[in-house]
Amino acid sequence: MEAYKSEFIEFMVESDVLKFGEFTLKSGRKSPFFMNAGAYVTGTQLMKLGEYYAKAIHENFGDDFDVLFGPAYKGIPLSVVTTIAYAKLYGKDIRYCSNRKEVKDHGDTGILLGSNMKDGDRVVIIEDVTTSGKSIEETFPIIMAQGDVEIKGLMVSLNRMEVGLGGKVGALDEIREKYGFDAKAIVTMNEVVEHLHNKPCKGKVIIDDTLKAAIDTYYEKYGAK
C-alpha cells in the first residue's frame, strides 16, 4: 500500500471522520462503519485533506485535466482545498467549479460557483464518498449542459465497496458502466480493514476481531462482487 494511503486511513480515524459502531445509512442499511467528510473542520485538516486528494488524482488521472468539479454541498470545500494543494504539489493551476442547489438570478447569476466551463474543458469530479451513485445522477447532466466538455473521472475519498443502485456491482463500477468515465477512491474499505485490523493506531486497536466479524457480515449482505 502506498504511504499516502496508510497515512490517509489514520488521518480519517484521527479526524473522527471514519467511525466504527452501529449506524443507519441514508439507504436504510445498518452499517458497522460510517464516514462523514463534514467532520473535517480545521485549517490543518482541510490542508491535509486537499493534499491526499491531489496525490490520488495525480496518481490516477495525471495532469490531463482543466477543472475540478465539486458537487454541492460537501464537494465545494473539497474542490477548493484540492485545487490549492494541486498547485502547491504539482505546480499546475487547475480551476475549481461547483454547482448551486438553486439557480441564482441576480448578481453572479447561474447554477455554477467558481469557474465557468467551456468547450474543450476536461473535468475531474470530486466527492467525499459514493455509496449508491445517486449523486452522480444529479451531477452529470449539470456538467454536460455546460458545453462540449469531457469528464476524465471521479475521485472519492473512500470506496465503501457496496452494491450500487442496480444491486449487482459496486457503485463506482456502475458509474463506469453507465457514464463511461473512470471512478477511483483514495482508499477502499479493504485497505482500511487491512491496515487497521488488530494493529495499533495511535496507541489503540481500532478494528479488533469482533468488529472485523461485523464488517465481514455486512459485506456478505451488501458487498460488491
Image: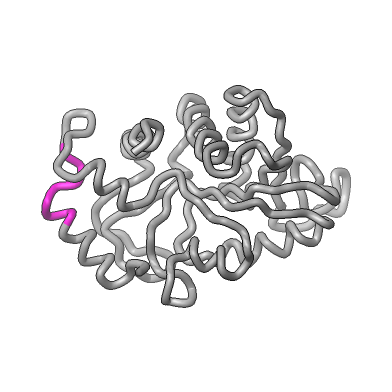
Q: Quadrant of residue 150?
A: bottom right
192 up-or-down from 224: above or below: above
**Picture quadrant of residue 23:** bottom left
Q: Which residues are magenta?
A: 205-212
Q: Position of residue 31 (x, y in %)?
A: 30, 62
The residue furthest left is 209
Q: Which residue is more in the foreground, 20 or 152?
A: 152
Nearest the viewer among 77 and 156 is 156
Which residue lies at the image location 43% right of the left edge and 41% below the top edge?
A: 39
The residue shown at (49%, 64%) is 173
Applied colour scheme: one colour
Horizontal relation, residue 22 to residue 209: left or right: right
Question: In the displayed structure, would residue 34 be above or below residue 55?
Answer: below
Question: Residue 192's x, y, as percent?
Answer: 30, 46
**Residue 206: within the magenta?**
yes
> Residue 138, relative to residue 11: is it above or below?
below
Residue found at x 20% / y 42%: 206
Quarter assignment of residue 114: top right
In the image, 48: left or right of 5?
Answer: right
201 vs 17, left or right, is left
Q: Quadrant of the C terminus?
A: bottom left
Task: Identify the residue at image location x=33%, y=52%.
Answer: 189
The answer to if 92 sits in the magenta stretch is no
Residue 134 is situated, as x and y percent measured from the top left of the image, at 55, 67
Instruction: Name the image quarter holding the N terminus.
Output: top left
Picture mark count: 0
